[in-house]
Every structure is written in C-alpha cells, then in structure tokens.
Image (cartoon, rainbow, N blue to C red):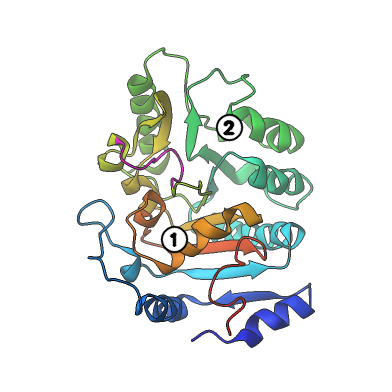
Amino acid sequence: MIKNQLWEDCRDNPTSSVVIPLKDAARVQEWSAQQRQSRPQKPDPTVEGERTNMVGQSWRLEVLADSGRMVQRGIELWQQWAIEAIAERGFFSVALSGGGTPKVFYEALASADLPWDKVYVFWGDERYVPADHPDSNYRMAKEALLDRVPIPDPNVFPMPTQAGNPQADADTYAKTLQQVFNSLLPTIDCTLLGVGGDGHTASLFPGTEALQSESAVTVGNKDGDPRITLTYPALNASKRVVFWIAGAGKADIVKTLLTETVGLPAQGVNPDGDLIWICDRAAAAKLPLVGLS
C-alpha cells in the first residue's frame, strides 16, 4: 500500500513531488481492491471491447505541489524529450490539448529554451469552428504560445475545420499525419491530454461512435456538436501520453480513472510508449496516497 509518508513529504516541502513509478501502478489497484471488498461486486467492464482495461494499464503518476511546479516539470520533460527525439529523427512532435490548465503551461513554454525550429505541433482534438473562433483550441495555443516563439509556420499542423464537412476534414488531417510520420498512425513524441468530469479525453466522449473508430482521426460528438479528434489507435501510437490535470474539481474523476475499472473513455488510452499522469495536489487529493488512515 502507498504510504502516508509520501504525501506528507510533499505537503511539508512544497518544492517536492510524489512520484509513483510505472512498476508501482499495481499498488494503487491494490488499494482500490481493498476499498471495494465491503461493497457488492460488479463485473469489471473493459474499455471499448478488447482494449486494455485499467488493470492492464501501466502508468506513472507525478503529484506536484501546485500548478507552478507542474509547469516547471512540464518544461523539464519537454526539453529532455526534445533532445532525444531530435537526435533520433530530427524533430520533436507534440499534440496539444485545449482548456485552461494547459493554457498556463503554454504561456510558460513561450519563455522556455527549446529548439522551436525543430518542434512540430499537432492537436489532439478541435471544436468544429473557424480557426479564429474564441472556442478554437488552435486559437488558444496560437495566442498563448505559437505567436510568441520562433516556430516556422510549416511546423504547425492545426486540424482543418473549413471544408464544411467534418468527416472530410478528419480524413484530411489523417492524411497529413501519414505524410509527416510516414506511417498509418502518428508516433507523436508527446501527446498532451486532459480529462472531463465524464471521463472523456480529447473528443472521445462516453457512448459515442468515435470510440469505435479504427482510423487515426475521426469526428467526435459533444451534445450534437461535431469535433475533430484523434482516435484510440492514434493516441496509443504515441511515444508518450501525458494526462495534465489540475484543480480540486478533477479530484473525483482522477480517483475514478486511476483506481477503478469503469470503462470511461480516458481509460482506453494505453499507449505503446509511456503513460504519465501529472497532477497538482488538489487533483490528486482523493487518491490513496492522500489521507490514508
């Protein structure tokens, strides 16, 4: 079982973090099983049929003291991964997410020392709105980061939303990914994701057809509004997937996703590479490393 001392160390020293390595992920599952022993048992659903459920996932959890420490850690990791990726194939590829939490990270990245001329930027999902629309994930990243760093325009690959046909635009983006990565699925170096309170990630929402897609890019559906999104096959082809989560409002869903097998969309993300959860204290507050008696 994860010891209280881990969290106490982080609480008492705000510059520290709690790291649960990949090999220790089963310890959280052990805790979860102990908590469920007194409750009626249900069959464990899998995520999207034959896809691996949480029991089979292997992940690393990092709990940082606050959002500022998260940003510092994120910059360190991007700098490290950029060096490795550029040495291997000449560029460092990232897929960005939308939302307020990553926006803070993007704003800080604008001052980071990165080889921007060798960074390729993609998106995990996009609302089907014009690129200059206030709800556009591209617009948010452009204003927070891309307009403030010397990244060449050809290195930026926004999801198209101008055809008036979401499926056609999804197919176009899939072809773009194939051309860049020279493969049917993109081996993105770092795919950044968030989670919603319903367990969705990217634009993979519970009960929607996008969960079943075998292509790299498809049309997601949010309450009837179309979105363009990477699919499980594309996300799981990533070299690293990072769930980037902050705030007390995410504590319940983080606990659910990491300690229970409930078949929510975020649990279908099981990349060939590393799966890393980076959270602040508030988002991790209900995990077993916090408040054990």
- Give whichever of discs 2 and 1 has the lower sequence position: 2
Answer yes or no: do the residues labelled 2 and 1 have beta carbons within 8 Å? no
Q: Residues within 10 Å of mark 1 (few under 14, many from 20)?
A: some
Q: Is residue 91 above or below residue 290?
A: above
Residue 36, image quadrant: bottom left
Q: What range of the chain is rendered magenta?
A: 200-208
* Residue at x 46% of width, y 75% of height: 22
Q: Is residue 216 above or below residue 283?
A: above
Residue 227 visible = yes
Within the magenta stretch, is there residue 201? yes
Q: Main secondary structure of the magenta part?
A: loop
Q: Is residue 193 above or below residue 209?
A: below
Q: Nearer the viewer, residue 173 or 260?
A: 260
Secondary structure found at label 1: helix
Residue 20 screen position, x and y as percent: 54, 77
Q: Is residue 99 above or below residue 56?
A: above
Q: Nearer the viewer, residue 29 or 291?
A: 291
Q: Quadrant of the C terminus?
A: bottom right
* Residue at x 44% of width, y 49% of height: 199
Q: Which residue is mark 1?
A: 257
Secondary structure found at label 2: helix
Three-letter residue code for mark 2: Asn
Residue 4, disc: none
Residue 242 screen position, x and y as percent: 52, 57
Three-letter residue code for mark 1: Leu
Q: Which residue is mark 2?
A: 137
Q: Nearer the viewer, residue 120 or 100?
A: 100
Within the magenta stretch, is there residue 177? no
